[in-house]
Each structure stands twice: as C-alpha cells, then as structure tokens.
Image (spheres, rainbow, N blue to C red):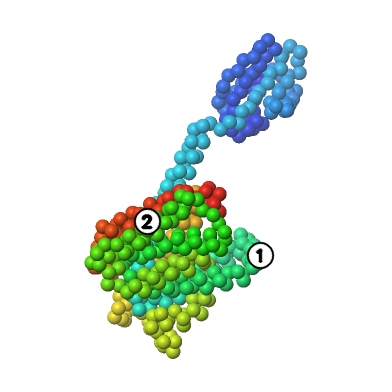
C-alpha cells in the first residue's frame, strides 16, 4: 500500500488535531496520528492528485494510476477532553476569584457606608445629594463615551423615560431615608435591617406584577423576616441591639428598603425635589435648607478647618463613593460570567461578615458594638433564609 505525502492536510481538514484512517482494496487499516505526521513520498506529481470531499465529510485522494488503490482520510474534529476540562477549570477559577473580589468589595462598601456617615451624621441629606450627583456625572460620562464608540445606539437612548418617574421618586426616598436612619443606628444593625429589602421585593412583585414564588422561596423570605425580628427585638432590654435608640430610626431604615425595592435608577432630580419634605423628618425648617446645605458642604470639604463633628471628611465619604462604584462594577461582572444566583449568594455572604466587622472597634468608631446571642441567632436565621431563597430560584428567573 502506498501512502501520500500531505504536508497541508491539516489545513484542508480542520484546525483541530485529527485522527487519520487509511484503507486499501484488500481490507482496512486505521491508526491514530499526531498533527505533525508526514506520510511517505509518492511518485505521482502533486498536480495529478485530486482531493475530493465526500458527503460524509471524508477527503478522498486519488492517484491517477490503475496500479495504486485509492485510500480515504477521515478527519475528526473532536476536541481532546483535556482542553475541555482545562477551559472549564479556568472558568471556575475565574468565577471563584470574581466572587471573592465581590464579597470583599461588598463588605468594604457596607462598612464605609457607616463610616462615611460618622463625619456627616448631621448632614445625611447633603451626603445623599453629593453621592447621587457624583454617580450621575460619572455614569453619564461613561454612557457618553460608549455612545460615541457606537456601543450604545440611538435606539437605546430613545427608550421611553416616562415610566422611570415613579422609579426615581422611590429611589430618592430610599436613599435619603436610608442615610438618615443609618446615621443614627449602630453599625451591625444596618445590614440586618437592610435585608428587609427581600421581603418588600417579594411582596411588591406578587401584588403588583402577579409573580408566583415557590414554597421554598416564600419560606426563605419568611426566615429572613423572622431573623431580623430575632436579631433586633429579642432578649432583655439590655441585650437588645437597638436598646436606647428611638423606634423611628429602625422603622425609617425598613421603610427605606421598601422604597429601594421598587426602584433602581434615575434618582438625582427627585432627591433634590424631595429634600424639603425629608428635611421635616430631621427637624430642619424649610427656610433653613440653604444654610443647611452650605454647612453640609463645609463639613464635607473640611480641609484644614477641623470643624467639630466632621473628623474623617472628606476622606471617608469619598472612599465610600469609590468603593460603592467598584462594588457595582464587580457585581455586574460576576453576573456576566456566572449567574444572578451566584452574584446573590456572594452579596449574601457579605452580610454576616459586615456585621462582624462593624461590631469591632474601627477608626472613628472606637466604641464598637457587642453582639448578643439573640442577635447572632437572628443573623444566622436571616442568612439561612437568604440561602434558601436564592438556591430555590428557578434558573430562568435567575438569568433574567
């Protein structure tokens, strides 16, 4: 049997490693080869060989001689399993690394949220304005660059915006009331009370959108609510986390989660418009708002002035804004390379870690906070509820 020299056979067949099989007229014989295999030189000029592609994907090379039988070369484009395993392993490592980064940024974001309100304790509404308009400027600049690059089209920009009015109002209320309450509450209570967001979200989507949830999801949501109650309202008066704090502030924090559950974007204008209404909650007369905003700006800048009560500004507020943006970008990237369920679980994991970190003595919060057994029990129940809810989410719903 004669074999032909095929120096460009791989180029004709496939870029993948191939398996070659040779046949003769008296029988068949097959053998595996490497892509670099060279077959023996034929006496027939290359110009007289006419490779033909059969319907079965075979390449048939014929020699124009009645003495030499034809033979068939079959190409297999199967990817070696090691390449598949390597790709899957690399993707798993990428998801794991991205999840760890997201958890770290989520914890830092929650901690800096409280620390930023230490120097701005008397000016939470000003800080809400500063962060909101800062986000608008930065995100608009990114949108403008993507639009100039052609990534964002005119059709995307032309999306009807009237439906976002209610979203902007709710988000504005959520930001302003949340910062107002967080400035007055102990650090560990903030991530606990913020988890009522899930309860509000499930209730609103069921009532307004008619969405149906599985029994496991409802059970997980109920565990979250029960965990919040156990964490902040159980035990003796001395052991309660919110002992000594006015009831209005945890109530405002819970209400802020309700506002945020119904909104997500376009909030800057409405934070400004709702400022007179929200100022009354803080006991600031409307006529004193200009003076309040001026004092808030002075406290935020606080460079070389050493204004009493503003220690830590502007470093802590700027760190919070930066960390919040980094966390959002990291979370979006994690959703992109994995799924919404993985991203939700990563954010959920940051809750108990944030509670622990906020209970420690920190810069500008040297007193720390003691965690009672009931608070730890409630936190554990809450985390179990979050896990049950996220794991029970259907794949299609999670992808959406």
Alpha-carbon neighbours of circle 1 within 10 Å: few (<14), some, or many (≥20)?
few
**Closer to us: 104 or 355:** 355
For mark 1, what is the residue?
A: 154
Q: Position of residue 335 (x, y in %)?
A: 50, 53
Q: Position of residue 296 (x, y in %)?
A: 39, 80
Residue 232 falls left or right of residue 89: left
Give the spatial CA distance, label 1 vs label 2: 44 Å
State the residue lying farthest toward the bottom. Answer: 287
| 84 versus 115 height, above or below | above
Q: Position of residue 344 (x, y in %)?
A: 45, 54
**Closer to us: 7 or 137:** 137
**Closer to us: 104 or 201:** 201
Q: Is residue 390 visible?
A: no
Residue 244 falls left or right of residue 276: left
Q: Earlier in the sequence, mark 1 or mark 2?
A: 1
- Dot 2 falls on a residue whose secondary structure is helix
**Closer to us: 347 or 192:** 192
**In which quadrant of the rendered image does the N terminus lie?**
top right
Q: Residue at x 42, y 77 (%)?
A: 125
Alpha-carbon neighbours of circle 2 within 10 Å: few (<14), some, or many (≥20)?
many
> Do residues under tags 1 and 2 come within 8 Å of each other at their CB atoms?
no
Q: Residue at x 38, y 52 (%)?
A: 384
Image mark for residue 382 = 2
């Amino acid at each position: 049997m004669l074999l032909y020299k095929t120096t460009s056979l791989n180029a004709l067949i496939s870029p993948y490693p191939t398996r070659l099989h040779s046949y003769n007229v008296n029988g068949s014989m097959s053998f595996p080869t490497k892509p670099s295999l060279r077959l023996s030189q034929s006496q027939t000029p290359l110009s007289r060989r006419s490779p033909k592609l059969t319907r079965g994907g075979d390449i048939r090379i014929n020699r124009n001689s009645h003495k030499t039988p034809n033979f068939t070369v079959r190409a297999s484009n199967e990817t070696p399993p090691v390449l598949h395993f390597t790709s899957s392993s690399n993707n798993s490592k990428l998801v794991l690394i991205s999840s760890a980064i997201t958890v770290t940024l989520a914890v830092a974001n929650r901690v800096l949220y409280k620390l930023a309100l230490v120097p701005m304790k008397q000016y939470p509404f000003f800080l809400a304005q500063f962060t909101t308009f800062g986000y608008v400027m930065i995100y608009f600049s990114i949108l403008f660059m993507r639009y100039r690059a052609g990534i964002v089209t005119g059709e995307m920009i032309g999306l009807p915006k009237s439906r976002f009015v209610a979203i902007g109002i709710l988000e504005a209320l959520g930001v302003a009331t949340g910062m107002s309450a967080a400035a007055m509450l102990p650090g560990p209570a903030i991530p606990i009370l913020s988890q009522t967001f899930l309860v509000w979200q499930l209730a609103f989507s069921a009532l307004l959108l008619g969405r149906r949830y599985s029994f496991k999801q409802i059970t997980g949501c109920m565990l979250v609510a029960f965990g919040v109650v156990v964490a902040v309202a159980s035990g003796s008066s001395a052991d309660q986390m919110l002992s000594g704090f006015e009831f209005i502030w945890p109530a405002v924090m819970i209400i802020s989660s309700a506002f945020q559950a119904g909104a997500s974007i376009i909030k800057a204008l409405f934070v400004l418009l709702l400022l007179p209404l929200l100022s009354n909650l803080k006991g600031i007369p409307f006529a004193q708002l200009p003076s309040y905003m001026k004092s808030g700006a002075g406290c935020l800048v606080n460079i070389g002035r050493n204004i009493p009560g503003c220690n830590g500004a502007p470093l802590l507020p700027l760190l919070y804004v930066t960390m919040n943006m980094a966390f959002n970008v990291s979370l979006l990237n994690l959703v992109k390379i994995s799924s919404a369920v993985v991203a939700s679980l990563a954010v959920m994991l940051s809750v108990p870690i944030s509670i622990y970190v906020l209970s420690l003595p920190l810069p500008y919060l040297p007193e720390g906070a003691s965690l009672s057994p009931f608070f730890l029990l409630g936190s554990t129940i809450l985390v179990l509820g979050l896990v049950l809810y996220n794991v029970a989410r259907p794949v299609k719903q999670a992808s959406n």
